[in-house]
Image: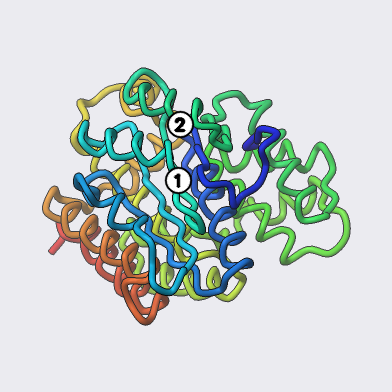
Amino acid sequence: MAKKTAQDDPLAPLTLAVGQEDLLLDRAVQQVVAAARAADADTDVRDLTPDQVQPGTLAELTSPSLFAERKVVVLRNAQDLSADTVKDVKGYLGAPAEEITLVLLHAGGAKGKALLDAARKAGAREVACPKMTKPADRLAFVRSEFRTVGRSATPEACQALVDAIGSDLRELASAVSQLVADVEGTIDEAVVGRYYTGRAEASSFTVADRAVEGRAAEALEALRWSLSTGVAPVLITSALAQGVRAIGKLSSARGGRPADLARELGMPPWKIDRVRQQMRGWTPDGVSVALRAVAEADAGVKGGGDDPEYALEKAVVTIARAARSRRT
């Protein structure tokens, strides 16, 4: 689970989220945005990737406003920012603007280390978001998810959930959310077994799995159920993106054993087997179409459209059609 420094004010001028675990990175951003909107419901949030940031962009976003509005500026994949933009960010760190929270998401490592060091030197509030590669870490994560929502789960139940779901933190978090929503009292191993042997999981990853398998009706049903149980739209677009990218990665990889492909593609072996089953109807053009659909849906749920639910439904249908492109 993300560990924070003693500087634990989400409204600090600078938050630095470091690591490669997407779920924890997104949660770090969500915590800052929630705190900002609790302080000012009209907070303006700008969530940007390196290709959306040019020299001068940061200065424009952080310039004083006539209405003195609060802003949250999120720069994702900060290690990939251009040299000129890094220079802008470093300059800003020396004199941060009032009522503005800058959130830098950095993968860690050697690339872009100068910016990482500069942010730390500037006194950034830091959130660690490392990849959880050890089973014990994932088990601790599941236990923490149950504790966070004030629910009890037996050690056997937590272990059974990790064994059933695998290593994907988003999928584990979604599974915990589903169990908490559906089950009263202590969650035990029998409950986990009942849910994860034969019963489809109503989560963002169920939506993605059904969509990339070309099962549009089932994907839409899972989507509506997920939304009705409170799954955040941004988690669904993320799951769709991961599902389509996994198809693209595996389809372009050389053949081999699951263990070899797992090392090459950075996926667990069990996921290689699943994706192999899902990719049968896909073509390279279908992957391109699906990725564009995910990008449009992602923009739609992050404020670029009026109806996030429609944006997701449109993406799911497009992806399901793309999954059948080899058969049509």
Quadrant of image for the C terminus: bottom left
Quadrant housing residue 76: top left
Q: Nearer the viewer, residue 112 or 287?
A: 112
Q: Earlier in the sequence, mark 1 or mark 2?
A: 1
Q: Where is residue 200 shown, x and y percent of the image? A: 56, 60
Residue 34 against residue 133 in the figure, above or below: below
Q: Where is residue 121 shown, x and y percent of the image? A: 50, 25
Residue under the point 44% across and 23% down: 117
Residue under the point 23% across and 66% down: 321
At label 2, counting other C-alpha atoms closer than 10 Å, the crowd grade (few under 14, some 14-19, many 20 or more) is many
Disc 1 residue type? Pro
Q: Where is residue 319 shown, x and y percent of the image? A: 27, 63
- SS under mark 1: loop
Query: In the picture provided, is 248 more to the left or to the right than 235?
Result: left
Q: Nearer the viewer, residue 280 or 302?
A: 302
Residue 302 against residue 78 in the figure, above or below: below
- SS under mark 2: helix
Residue that badge 1 annotates: 96
Disc 2 residue type? Ala
At label 1, counting other C-alpha atoms closer than 10 Å, the crowd grade (few under 14, some 14-19, many 20 or more) is some
Q: Where is residue 277 shown, x and y percent of the image? A: 34, 45
Which dot, 1 or 2, sits closer to the camera?
1
**Mark carried by residue 119:** 2
Q: Nearer the viewer, residue 176 or 121?
A: 121
**Mark carried by residue 23:** none
Colouring of the image: rainbow
Quadrant of image for the N terminus: top right
Quadrant housing residue 137: top right
Spatial separation of the CA atoms under disc 1 and disc 2 = 12 Å
Q: Residue furthest bottom?
A: 306
